[in-house]
Image (tube, rainbow, N blue to C red):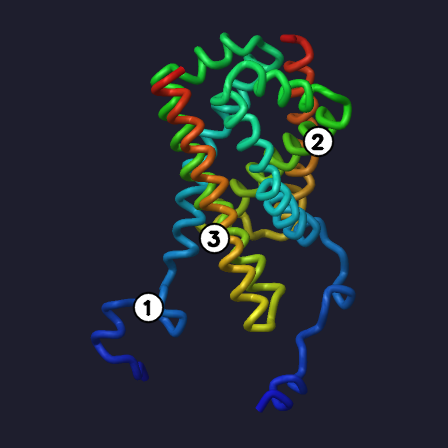
Amino acid sequence: MDMRTPLGKVRGLGSAKSGTEHFWRVRTTSLALVPLILFYVVFLICYAGRPYEEVIAALANPFVSVITVLTILAGIIHMKLGMEEIIQDYFHSEGLKLSLLVLNSFFSYIVGGLCLLAALKIAFAG
Amino acid sequence: MTNVTKSRPLSPHLQIYKFVPTMAMSILHRITGAALYVGTILVAAWLIAAASGAEHFDRVNWLFGSIIGQLVLIGYTWALIHHLIGGLRHIMWDVGMGYEKHFANRLAIANLVASVVLTLLVWAAVFLFV
């Protein structure tokens, strides 16, 4: 027997009130990161040890800039969600858990913001 | 109520179970993920230095080019490749494939071997190009 109300069924959110969004976002960002990271591995092999002007010129290429921004966005979301899972698994005291989750958000968005600003500066100003 | 919560029975812990490759790769997936999380500081340092001018860029490049820097970067490369292949394995399980235990264990070992081999290939390519 199903005790859920029709509205509850339609919303599809369980007791955690967030449904499968966390799971789904980890997977979509992970799929996006496969080609993005492969591109960057090849890029870094090609430009490791190259002079500043050459690396900047390559990074300022519009195609590379878009890849850089997408990699940062997908990477930051993916790592924030992954660390949330680790924190929720290993920290059981409510206060410590919440503090670490907040710190995780701050760390992720600060690192992501700095990377994005740097990538956009290179893209627009060289 | 807190006492009731504390005296609840716990499920058997790690040392109860026989060691299998999939469990080792499971925890390694999490460890490499956490390492990559910290490693984004290196990515940020490199990008910010590149955006700040030749002087800063050369300084970070010197740091990454030192022996310790190279060792950290090789470790970062391995963590990245291992986590990427492990992620593909998880996607396979998410779509409902690859649950047969011998296959899953062989794939877990292949994951480890492939990550080491690919890391060596990437760094061989880096040293060949430089």
Q: CA distance from mark 3 to mark 1?
A: 23 Å
Residue B115 or residue A21, whichever sits in front: A21
Which corner quadrant holds the C terminus of chain A?
Answer: top left
Chain to which the residue tagged by mark 3 belongs: A
Marked residue nearer the N-terminal end (3 or 1): 1
**Residue toward you, A74 or A21:** A74
- The chain letter for the residue carrying disc 1 is A
Left or right of residue B83: residue A40: left
Q: Chain of mark 2?
A: B
Q: Residues within 10 Å of mark 2 (few under 14, many from 20)?
A: some
Rendering coords of residue A99 (x, y %) = 54, 63
Residue beneath label 1, please?
Answer: A13
Residue A57 is drawn in which quadrant?
top left
Residue located beneath label 3 in the image: A105
| B42 versus A15 height, above or below | above
The amino acid type found where label 3 is placed reads Ser
On screen, residue B96 above or below B79: below
Quadrant where the N terminus of chain A is found in the figure: bottom left
Q: Is residue B120 above or below residue B99?
A: above
Disc 3 on helix, strand or loop? Answer: helix
